Image: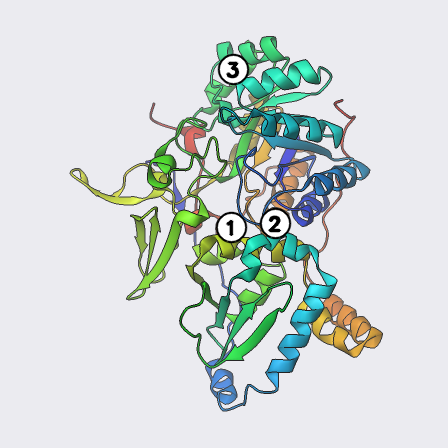
Amino acid sequence: MLNSATPNAAPSGPLVLPPWLTRAMTPLPLGPLQPLLALTLSRIGRLHPELYGRLGEHAEKSFGIAPTDLPFAFVLEPRPERPQARAVRELPPGLDVRIRGSLSGLIGMAEGRIDGDALFFSRTLSIEGDMEATLALRNALDDARLDFGTLLLGCLGPLGTRLAEILRRQAGGVPPGPVASGGPSWN
Amino acid sequence: MELICPAGTPASLEAAVEAGADAVYCGFRDETNARNFPGLNFSREELRRGIAFAHRHGVKALVAINTFARAGAFSLWQAAIDDAVAAGADALILADLATLAYAARRHPGQRLHVSVQAGAANPDAIRFYAESFGAQRIVLPRVLGVTEIASIVRETSCETEVFVFGGLCVMEEGRCSLSSYATGKSPNMHGVCSPAGNVAYAERDGRVVSTLGGFTINSFDRGEPAGYPTLCKGRFVTPHGTGYTFEEPVSLDAGVLLPALRDAGVTAFKIEGRQRGRAYIAGVVRSFRDILTALDSGRSAPMTGLAAMSEGQANTVGAYRKAWR
């Protein structure tokens, strides 16, 4: 054991929806969500076909995604032929993977803005089930550079895409760093 | 001083370049590299495009082919070497003597780096790699103190590269078989320590229990920072007591030692984490770029503040300041 290990203060975690909002959403019907989820998944598959290359055989698996601050969860079956996503009150048994975390953490991880391992270390993300499928999904999403705002507003056409871009800029984000000048080529 | 940064996917490669990498390192989507994780790594075409992107930004691209070739399957490693050279790799990172010999013979103009997996930890071993294969850089194993590194630099003509941040392998690198015993798959030959297919997590009364190949590795209490399910950082019951037998869940952060490592004559600083997401890569690379910029201008190095990115949310300077042997 190394004696120099120094524990650090836990960082502030991802945003969590206030309990009153979660309670307020509880009676809402899930029906209207279903076409929106189907449309979003369809757009992801169309705009990011490379995602399936990274998922490989794991595209056939079922993923349960349960935001801890929402009164419902999602079941995702990314199959390239017939992708399905649906909202459910509770995750059903028999899923290959079950992922739990705050909504903002899960979206941040799916968009690559938040590191999934860091969420796991902080205990704000928990995973049960097929870890190969979990890693394949995480890596595929991280490489795809999804932007859910653009995906959702993109359903409104070019105007929606433009609106998403304006919102993204206003929300800020990680600015690109300096590009290294580099030295002479080795070879 | 060069900053060598991980890239597990094309998007990560671009994030590393944009965050200030001098060089990125990556591998193919197979067992020829030591981060053979599901959904990770590069196809041949992705590597070619990734290297072109790096070069357009003045950044070098290194290709890790750093596992040990299986008997009867050497053609897989040969093809990886040939394809990496054809894709325009600035250097190959190799560990196996057979791959080094093949690359040196088949591609005599290609720059070769000796991977940390080779475990070259003394001047004689390093001279052997340099004289036998023309290796121009050694990635030093994470078991050396700063004074030992300074001594190695003085006694060899090879460039040296050291890890400064990320996952901390505390065993004899390239030779550790702990994960192999538990899973039947070798980190050194199949390219993955604690393979995901052998890992399971279970929630029990607020605790998270991690297992590897059916062996319980750890049990984290509610709110306790978690770590990877590696045997070297597991918590065990032994006749000597209960706790961390080898090492705690912790990541290396040698940010405060960069001036000392620079003064020791190290050529390049390496960040571990090809298996991590873009957010990790962008954040860690930018942090270390800031430190190097400060050092270059004679200012003191800022703290990295990267605890949130670290295993167990804790950091160590590891063996660089060790008080043991």
Using the rendered view, name the quadrant where residue B240 is placed. top left
Q: Earlier in the sequence, mark 3 or mark 1?
A: 3
Q: Residues within 10 Å of mark 3 (few under 14, many from 20)?
A: many
Q: Secondary structure at mark 3?
A: helix
Give me the residue at 68% from left, 70% from top.
Answer: A42
Instruction: Using the image, tell me which numbered label, if any, was put on residue B7.
Output: none
The answer to whether marks 2 and 3 mark residues whose Cβ atoms lie closer than 8 Å is no
Mark 1 lies on residue: B309
Instruction: Left or right? Give the position of A95 relative to B97.
Output: left
Give x and y (percent) for residue B10: 69, 46
Out of B155 and B136, give the one closest to the viewer.
B136
**Can you identify the residue that label 3 sits on?**
B152
**Is residue B56 in view?**
yes
C-alpha span from label 1 to label 2: 9 Å
Q: Which residue is mark 2?
A: B283
In the image: residue B113, left or right of residue A177: left
Q: Is residue B37 left or right of residue A158?
A: left
Q: Quadrant of residue B203?
A: bottom left
State the SS at label 1: helix
Which quadrant is home to the C terminus of chain B? top left
Q: Are the residues at dot 1 and dot 2 in contact (C-beta closer than 8 Å)?
A: yes
Near-viewer residue (A4 or B234): B234
User: Which residue is pictured at 28% across the width and 38% down the height?
Assistant: B245
Compared to residue B246, the image places residue A26 above or below, namely: below
x, y percent for residue B241: 18, 42
Instruction: Please name the amino acid that badge 3 sits on.
Output: Ile
Residue type indicated by callout 2: Gly
